[in-house]
Image (cartoon, grey):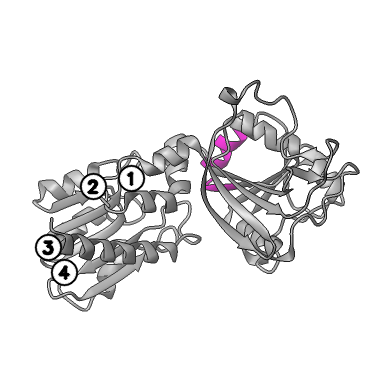
Amino acid sequence: MNQLALDRDRRAMRLAILASREARKIARPNPWVGAVFVAADGRVSSGSTRPPGGDHAEVVARDRAKFDLRGSTLYVTLEPCSHHGKTPPCAEMLIREGVSRVVIGSLDPDERVSGMGIKVLQEAGVQVEIGLLASEIKADLAPYLVHRQLGRPFTFLKVAATLDGYIAARDGSSKWITSGASREEVARLRAYADAIITGAGTVRSDDPSMRAHGLEDKSPRRIVLGQIPESARILPARAYSGDISELMTSLADEGVVVAMVEAGAKVAKSYLDAGLIDQINLFLAPKFIGGTDGIKIFDGVGAGSIAEAFDFEIAYSRRWGPDIELILRSKWLANFIGDEEAEKS
C-alpha cells in the first residue's frame, strides 16, 4: 500500500475512533464501536453503537448513508459480529450491502465473535484488513477487552497523594490534598465507572458519598468492603465481606465493565497484591508531609527487592490546576495494548 492510501485509511479510521467515543458510556456492557463507510467518490457516513438492544455502529452508519454502499470501504474499530443476538449479524448485513473492503482496528475477544466475523466476510469475498491504529483502539476499548478476556471488570485505582507519597497526615487528615480542579476530574471519573469500591474504614473516617457530584444521574453503584454504618452518606450501597477476586468476577457477571477503587491504603494494597489493578489514576499535589509517620498509598508488606516491585508504565499525564495526574497502566495491560500492531507507523 502506498503512503497516500495508508494516510487516507488512517484518517478514516480516526473518524471511526472519534465516533466510538460518543458511545463509551451508553453502550456498556457492550463494546463502544465506531464505524465509517467511505464511498468510491469519497462520501462518508459514520455511526456508533447505541444502548444495549439498539443498533450496532455499522447499522447506524448504514442508515445515515446518503449513498449506495456497494463497492464502499468500511472502517470499524472492532470486528463486526457474526451471531444472532438482540440484533442481526453485522457481517451478513455488510455482505448484503455489497461492501467490498472492511478495515478492522481490533479483533473481538467475545467467544461468540472471536474471528468468526472476519471468516464470514472473507468467505463471501470481502477484502478484510486487520490492525490499523490497533494500539489506539485497544487503549480505548481496554475496559471491554479486559472484561471479555479476563472475566472481571477493568479496574482502576484512584489515588490523591503528596509528592512524597502520602495520602494522609499522621492524624489521618486528607482533606484536601489535591485542588478543586482535581476533585472535579474525580467526579468525572466516578461517572465513567459502573461501580465504585471502597472500604468500611474510609466510610467510617471520611463518610464520603462517592457520588459523581454535578453528574448525579451518572453516579455508579457503590460497594463497601465491610459493614456500612446506618447513617453513612454512601447509602444506598452494597456491603461485601469475602474474597475480592470473587467479588470482581460476580460484578463482571452483573454487567460491570469498569470498576473504580477509591479507598484507603489497606484496600488499595489488597487489590495490588491480588493483581486486580489495571490502571492507577494518581493525582499528585505539590505538597510534602515530610518525615516517616504519615499514611502511604499502600499499607502492608512491600516488595523485598526492586526485582519484586509492582511494575507499571506511565501512559500519559495531565495537569489539573496545581496538580499533576499520572495515568499508570499495569505492565501486562501496556504490553497487551501495544502488541499485535499490524500497521507500520
* Drawn side of residue 194 relative to residue 162, left or right: left
252 drawn magenta: yes
Q: Label 3 to label 4, Cα distance in Å? A: 6 Å
- Does the magenta portion include 223? no
- Look at the numbered discs 2 and 1 and tell me whether their residues touch, using CB distance below 8 Å: yes
Q: Earlier in the sequence, mark 2 or mark 3?
A: 3
How far is the residue under mark 1 from the one under mark 4? 24 Å
Q: Return the mark for residue 311.
A: none
| 2 and 4 marks in contact (CB < 8 Å) | no
Residue 275 on image: x %, y %: 57, 31
- For the record, the magenta segment spans 246-259
Compute the Cα span from label 2 to label 4.
Answer: 19 Å
Give the residue type at disc 1.
Asp
Instruction: Identify residue for label 1.
Output: 108
Rate crowding at label 1 as few (under 14), some (14 to 19) or many (20 or more) other CA atoms within 10 Å: many
Task: Say what amino acid the circle numbered 2 marks.
Answer: Gly
Foreground disc of the pair 2, 1:
1
Closer to viewer: mark 3 or mark 1: 1
Q: Residues within 10 Å of mark 3 (few under 14, many from 20)?
A: some
Callout 1: SS: loop
Name the residue nearer the viewer: 159 or 120: 159
Q: In which quarter of the image is the N terminus?
A: bottom left
Q: Name the residue under label 4.
A: 69
As measured in the structure, the alpha-carbon distance from the residue carrying label 2 to the one carrying label 1 is 9 Å
Type of amino acid at the residue the image marks with label 3: Gly
**Residues tagged 3 and 4 counted as in contact (Cβ below 8 A):** yes
Residue at which label 2 appears: 117
Query: How dense is the environment of label 4, judged by Cα within 10 Å: few (below 14), some, or many (20 and up)?
Result: many
